[in-house]
Image: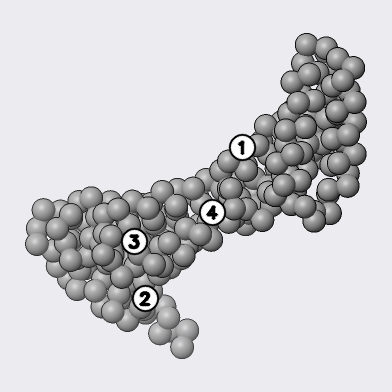
Amino acid sequence: MVAFVFVACDDYNKLMKSTDYDYKLQRADEYYDTKVYARAAELYEELIPIFRGTDKSERIYYRYAWSEFKIGDAILSQYHFKNFARQFPNSEHTEECYYMNAFCYYLNSPNYSLDQTYSRNAIKEFQSFIDLYPQSSKVDTCNAMIDILRAKIERKEYEIIKQYHKIYDFKAAAVAAGNFIKEYPLSLYNEEMYWVIIDSYYSLALNSYPSKKKARIEAAIENYVKFASLYPKSSYLSRAENIYNHCIRLKEKL
């Protein structure tokens, strides 16, 4: 068995040194067809510039992109799927590669607690795919993944706002929570976001210069009225009502 491995490795090393590119392509295809994607990828990568402009170029590049994907390199394969679609806009594989470009971004989207750049890029690419191929059988799948990604970004932003409030950065909390409600009007977190806004503006008002106090009291009152109307059974209601009543008294003294 050990001897066989050494012979196989030696044959592959000789193959890599060969300048018989047609034979290399034949072997690359054999590796690809037998799912030995790492070796196929290495050979296809070398052959791409060799066969550029020939009738073999499209197939080589397509298989190279898929080889990189199959060995688990979603970042590199994303680039090549998109580049394939741009280089071969009339290929039978163009739609598929546009989709895989977006899907690779999706695969690289991390846990909500981490940076969500890949999630935002994935949403952008999925939407571009839908715009290009509105009749594609993949549209429903794209929309489902967009929903997953948006939920992840929403959770990330929610946690950031909670942290602002927790560390008493009330100005950032109030502004960010207001923007959150505008961005996600149907979010399940909006009940808490209204509480954050009310409490943040109230806390800011208590420590404000007179020139800013009135506006912040009025902001707390205004958001309480919206909140009480939308969430009459909220667990935050009694605390919010106490703040509202105090704000009314503070406003009367201004």
Pointer 4 with pointer 3, Cβ within 8 A: no
Q: Earlier in the sequence, mark 1 or mark 3?
A: 3
Q: Amino acid at mark 4?
A: Arg
Q: Splitting the image into 4 quarters, where does residue 70 fall?
A: bottom left
Q: Amino acid at mark 3?
A: Tyr
Towards the viewer: 151 or 244: 244
Q: Earlier in the sequence, mark 4 or mark 2?
A: 2
Q: Which mark is residue 36?
A: 2
Q: Earlier in the sequence, mark 2 or mark 3?
A: 2
Distance from label 4 to label 3 (Cα)?
A: 18 Å
Distance from label 2 to label 1 (Cα)?
A: 50 Å
Discs 4/1, front: 1
| Residue 30 place in picture, x, y as percent | 26, 78
Q: Splitting the image into 4 quarters, where does residue 247 fall?
A: top right
- Residue underneath mark 4: 150
Q: Residue at horizontal 13%, vertical 63%?
A: 56
Q: Which mark is residue 179?
A: 1
Q: Residue at horizontal 74%, vertical 39%?
A: 225
